[in-house]
Amino acid sequence: MIREAQEHFDVLVIGGGPAGMAAAVRAAECSVRVGIVDDNAAPGGQIWRRGVEEDGLTPEATRWRQLLWNSSITRLCGRSVFDLPSPGVVWAEGPAGLCELHYRNLVLATGARERFLPFPGWTLPNVTGAGGLQALVKSGLRIHGRRVVVAGTGPLLLAVAAYLRKHGAEIPLVCEQASWASLAQFTAALIRHPGKIKEGLELKLELRGVPLVANTWPLAANGRHALESVDILRGGQRESIACDYLACGFHLVPNIELPMLLGCKIEEGLVQVDGMQQTSVDRVFCAGEPTGIGGLELSLIEGQIAGLAAAGDAAKARALFHQRRKARSFARILDRAFHLRSELRKLATAETIVCRCEDISYSRLQEQTSWRAAKLHTRCGMGPCQGRVCGTATQFLFNWNVDSFRPPIFPVRVESLSDMTARKVANTVRS
Amino acid sequence: MPSEVTLTVNGATVSVPSGATVAVAVAMAGQPCRKSATGEPRGVLCGMGICFECRVVINGRAHSRSCQVLCEPGMEVSTDD
């Protein structure tokens, strides 16, 4: 087995999305050794996923990319961080083997994932996340001429619908579960965020002719081997729409597995940080979606503050505080507007699979009293996703507190684990 | 860099744009990625390496997340039969 050399950094950033890129770039300005490690093939995270398109990036994304490329930062892509075995040490697995990374200061910029909710047929091929389908198309899937129903909740739906349409998809409908009243309040609250209003208007323009309906959500996806149609509830009426894809996501949830593993203080699913983006754990900073879903602008500001603070330049970090205040108010607006309605708890029937890794049905989980009990008695959440999909769903469905996360936080090869364990034992014996 | 990459999915030849992920090649081959614990066909859900629904065998390495791996010329991909 090829084992990559150990590497030492003054500032190590985990996560290569906008927050992580900003953190790494600003930290490197302070002439310290900076590394950035990410699971994906290239930096950019989900929002700046480049894929097969030459011109797929915004000017802002291009600017940060260039800053990253023109810096002395060590980029470690295609590597999954699976354990933080002791303070100052990160273990990651990549295609070429394992790497052990050492840090003085750590910035966690682990981003967010889509929230998926179970409904009959949601496990059929071609029922994907909203961002999930966009990622596939960015990665080369041809969507031209295909019929795609976009559903769920959150501003991502419009962005995805516009993107898919631009690439030739037919969008018969965008279904938003929030009420018209919530959407109206959301729009009104954007008055303090003119940039967001401009973005919204541009999306509306790109989506002219595509109906966007509020108070509407999917009831069932139908098909034999793959999706053929989706049933929706629109204004209280059930109707069926033929389609090739259902792109469905219910807003975003932060990836907090690594902060949990380190023992960072977490409240209501969000990592708690101070003004410098420092968590409750010494020398561990957190930026972007894990501290609250606030989108690109907030992620870039938090990332910069965390990077500067981790590199020891508190004055430069402080200069960005006023920008962060404003961007954070947008996070609160998002949270209010796209709150999930209780009807969505009733979509799954007794037979509907909730845990997709282990094929555990809703009726089997209904009998359980907690996440822990469900894991022990049904194997729910014990598959390779480790509850990232079903844990998030059951939190909403049953109000379960998904509180247990153990390393390795991603599946790793047995040889990797045994190698790392052997090294840990050897180090203990030596010290 | 060539603009297309050719690989095989369950023995059938597939050409994808350079930079495409294995998940795209599997979709172009018209295949689901895997069979679930109870035998249901499954395909990509999250597209970002979280859900593990897209796992396939890539060059003999099982349980590879096809959405996170870029296609390479001559790559051999197989899904659950």
Image (cartoon, rainbow, N blue to C red):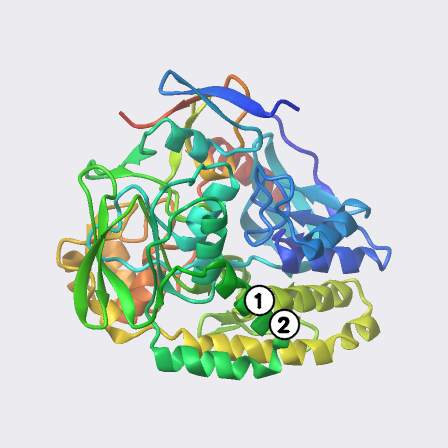
Residue A276 location in percent, x, y?
70, 73
The answer to whether the residues at label 1 and label 2 have Cβ atoms under 8 Å apart is yes
Marks counted in the figure total: 2
Label 2 Cα crowd, 10 Å radius (few <14 / some 14-19 / many 20+):
few
Q: CA distance from mark 1 to mark 2?
A: 6 Å
Residue B77 location in percent, x, y?
42, 23
Q: Is residue B72 above or below residue A204?
A: above
Residue A257 location in percent, x, y?
48, 58
> Residue A19 occupies which quadrant of the picture?
bottom right
Residue at label 2? Answer: A195
Q: Is residue A157 above or below residue A336?
A: above
Chain letter for the residue marked with disc 2 in the picture? A
Residue A199 marker: 1
Q: Which of A295/A81 is in front?
A: A295
Residue B41 location in percent, x, y?
25, 36
Looking at the image, can residue A274 be seen? no
Q: Looking at the image, which residue is at 59% across and 39% down?
A: A53
Q: Looking at the image, which residue is at 54% across and 23% down?
A: B5
In this picture, residue A351 sits left or right of residue A148: left
Q: Looking at the image, which residue is at 23% across and 57% down?
A: A119
Report the quarter where the N terminus of chain A lies: top right
